[in-house]
Image (tube, rainbow, N blue to C red):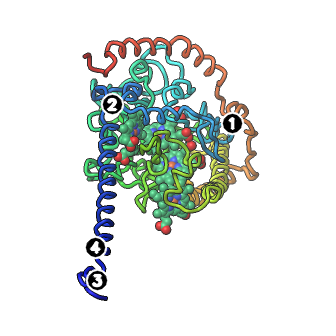
């Protein structure tokens, strides 16, 4: 090719064309730059509060004035219409769906009442209405400690800041009934000054410290999961930290696997309750969602909870985070298809396939555990001695812990199918070994037949079988809802009214 100056000498119009094309490119680049600057300015505008929000403002509505898009989508967690095959936002009575749970939790609150989790919007209502929290008529009444409020509300960091963390964990649940009233919201996850994600629950920070990690050094992407790990984790109430306090603690010191947490609990001799039939020292897995998620392929590829449960959404040219935290199967386009090219139908089928396969085995384990409780009761009835039962009861404890770790890690069958299957299969092995020991013991005690399986085909029958006075619990609850709850709300209204509109500092 000839040098350019020669071409131009021959054909001067080429120079003009080059000149005009360059002008056009510069002009277009200018437009692009200006659009970027404008969008940047808009984004700053969108993320700058239009009203003052004080540090521990618990009212989502007050934040909502500055961030209407996030608030409106957050508010949609009130929508409980979507149901997937096993999950979704509906109110599902799990004891009705599977009455065997009643027997597994005999002697513990969950046998009274257990519904599947709904949207964050319902966190306060559902806790007040649950039979598990009882019907306390006084601040010092009731079965639950005040610690039960910890994962329900942005009033929690506010009250902890005012009264101190250990102080918050002291006394009964009813003591804080008028203090904790706003459902899970903005102040749980955000710093009001910068809108950066922040950790507000000390239990998570303390668990990291004990593992020798500084949570403040987490990356932005890790924070998009850690805000959820404040609540969607395994925990227990430690009574040995401060007198009178049920101190919320995550049992991660030895690791987060089912075995590591079991060893932690076994070593300290911890139990959540003594089983009513088998007398086994039981553990209740809470919801080790974060722990199980970490073992899955998505976590290993750096996909955060927010990537699937809080995807980006566009509205009027504005991209923002969808705060309608829900089952991603209700929004596959934004939740999955940003990374996967498959059709919605295929992606949903992938999820169901994993769930079906895992639930098939979980079901098997569940029956084995129910049978072992019933057989252990038979052994006690026939005069078994403590030392004959010791190993068997530990077996029941460990088998049910594995079942619960898998069942309660909500979403675990999708988040980490391989680990969840492994946990269940180790549970099946332990349950079978325990039942062999039980059969031998029963035989030593002169009983050589199959122990009859009780008729627990409905929730009502199962609750009757374990001797639970459900009608009384329900009647008491109604009185509590009529007399106590309105008093709590009135007190809360008076407190919030005294703050003025702009936040919880008087201005
Ligand atoms: C302050 C504690 C807390 C935090 C923080 C929290 N959750 Fe929840 N979450 C809950 C509670 C409690 C429920 C059950 C509410 C109910 O059933 O009343 C729940 C329910 C859910 C549900 C079920 C909703 C449905 O409609 O099926 C999903 C999904 C969920 N959370 C995901 C997340 C994700 C993802 C994060 C982090 C971005 C997160 N949560 C942060 C406490 C929390
Ligand atoms: C369970 C935790 C959680 C709660 C509750 C929550 N947010 Fe967020 N919020 C997030 C996450 C995660 C992001 C994404 C942040 C990022 O990646 O930088 C976010 C982003 C934002 C942003 C930045 C702009 C955007 O849309 O990405 C704003 C503003 C915001 N949230 C406002 C709110 C408001 C207002 C509320 C209460 C109505 C609220 N958030 C409740 C977790 C939460
Ligand atoms: C931010 C990107 C991202 C998002 C969002 C995402 N995925 Fe994935 N997904 C991945 C990556 C990366 C892998 C690992 C595949 C690999 O490395 O080859 C994966 C793996 C999978 C697998 C195979 C893993 C297994 O369990 O055997 C399935 C199934 C899957 N994703 C389904 C989904 C579904 C359903 C959603 C929405 C709820 C979703 N993914 C959302 C990135 C994503
Ligand atoms: C790759 C996408 C993906 C990631 C990452 C992810 N989830 Fe999920 N999650 C799902 C899917 C899909 C389901 C199954 C929903 C169904 O069955 O309807 C689910 C289910 C759940 C459920 C039960 C929902 C219900 O309706 O009851 C909870 C709670 C949950 N996830 C919380 C979390 C938390 C907390 C994290 C991070 C520690 C997380 N998820 C990370 C995709 C994801």
Q: Which residue is farthest left?
A: 5
Tag 4 residue: 15
- Can residue 488 be seen here? yes
Q: Is residue 38 above or below residue 342?
A: above
Please report whichever mark, 2 or 4, sits nearer to the chain's N-terminal start: 4
- Residue 375 image label: none
Please report whichever mark, 3 or 2, sits nearer to the chain's N-terminal start: 3
- The residue at the point 29 percent across, 42 percent down is 41
Q: Position of residue 20 (x, y in %)?
A: 31, 65
Q: Give the position of the C terminus as an image quadrant.
A: top left
Badge 4 marks a residue whose secondary structure is helix
- The residue at the point 28 percent across, 83 percent down is 10
Callout 2 touching callout 1 (CB < 8 Å): no
Disc 3 residue crowd, few under 14, some 14–19, many 20+, Cα 10 Å: few
Of marks 4 and 3, the one in the foreground: 3
Please report whichever mark, 4 or 1, sits nearer to the chain's N-terminal start: 4
- Residue 96 image label: 1
- Alpha carbon distance from label 3 to label 1: 90 Å
Q: Give the position of the N terminus as an image quadrant.
A: bottom left
Tag 2 residue: 157
Callout 3 touching callout 1 (CB < 8 Å): no
Tag 3 residue: 10
Question: Is the CB of the residue bearing disc 3 within 8 angstroms of ligand 3?
Answer: no
């Amino acid at each position: 090719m000839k040098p350019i100056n020669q071409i131009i000498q021959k054909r001067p119009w080429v120079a003009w064309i080059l000149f005009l094309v360059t002008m056009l490119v510069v002009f277009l680049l200018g437009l692009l730059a200006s659009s970027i600057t404008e969008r940047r300015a808009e984004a700053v505008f969108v993320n700058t509060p239009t009203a003052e929000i004080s540090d521990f403002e618990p009212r989502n509505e007050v934040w909502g004035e500055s961030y209407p898009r996030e608030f409106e989508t957050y508010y949609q967690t009130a929508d409980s219409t979507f149901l997937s095959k096993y999950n979704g936002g509906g109110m599902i009575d799990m004891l009705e769906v599977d009455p065997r749970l009643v027997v597994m939790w005999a002697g513990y609150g969950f046998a009274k009442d257990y519904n599947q989790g709904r949207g964050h919007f319902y966190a306060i209502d559902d806790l007040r209405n649950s039979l598990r929290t009882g019907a306390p008529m006084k601040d010092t009444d009731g079965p639950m400690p005040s610690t039960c409020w910890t994962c329900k509300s942005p009033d929690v960091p506010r009250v902890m800041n005012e009264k101190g963390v250990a102080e918050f964990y002291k006394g009964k649940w009813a003591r804080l009934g008028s203090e904790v009233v706003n459902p899970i919201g903005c102040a749980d996850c955000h710093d009001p000054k910068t809108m950066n994600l922040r950790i507000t629950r000390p239990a998570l920070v303390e668990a990291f410290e004990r593992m020798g990690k500084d949570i403040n050094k987490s990356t932005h992407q890790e924070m998009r999961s850690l805000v959820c790990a404040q609540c969607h984790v395994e925990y227990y109430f430690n009574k040995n930290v401060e007198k009178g306090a049920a101190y919320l603690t995550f049992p991660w010191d030895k690791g987060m696997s089912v075995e590591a947490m079991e060893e932690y609990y076994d070593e300290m001799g911890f139990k959540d309750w003594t089983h009513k039939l088998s007398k086994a020292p039981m553990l209740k897995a809470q919801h080790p969602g974060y722990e199980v998620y970490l073992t899955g392929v998505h976590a290993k590829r750096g996909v955060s909870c927010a990537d699937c449960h809080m995807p980006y959404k566009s509205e009027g040219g504005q991209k923002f985070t969808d705060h309608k935290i829900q089952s991603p199967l209700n929004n596959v386009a934004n939740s999955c298809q940003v990374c996967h090219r498959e059709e919605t139908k295929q992606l949903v089928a992938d999820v169901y396939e994993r769930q079906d396969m895992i639930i098939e085995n979980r079901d098997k384990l569940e029956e084995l555990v129910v049978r072992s409780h019933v057989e252990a009761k038979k052994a006690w009835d026939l005069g078994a001695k403590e030392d004959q039962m010791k190993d068997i009861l530990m077996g029941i404890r460990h088998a049910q812990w594995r079942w619960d770790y898998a069942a309660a890690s909500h979403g675990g069958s999708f988040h980490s199918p391989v680990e969840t299957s492994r946990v269940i299969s180790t549970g099946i092995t332990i349950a079978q070994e325990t039942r062999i020991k039980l059969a031998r013991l029963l035989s030593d005690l002169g009983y050589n037949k199959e122990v009859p399986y009780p008729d627990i085909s409905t929730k009502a029958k199962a609750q009757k079988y374990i001797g639970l006075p459900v009608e009384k619990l329900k009647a008491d609850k109604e009185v509590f809802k009529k007399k106590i709850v309105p008093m709590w709300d009135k007190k809360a209204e008076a407190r919030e009214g005294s703050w003025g509109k702009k936040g919880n500092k008087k201005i």
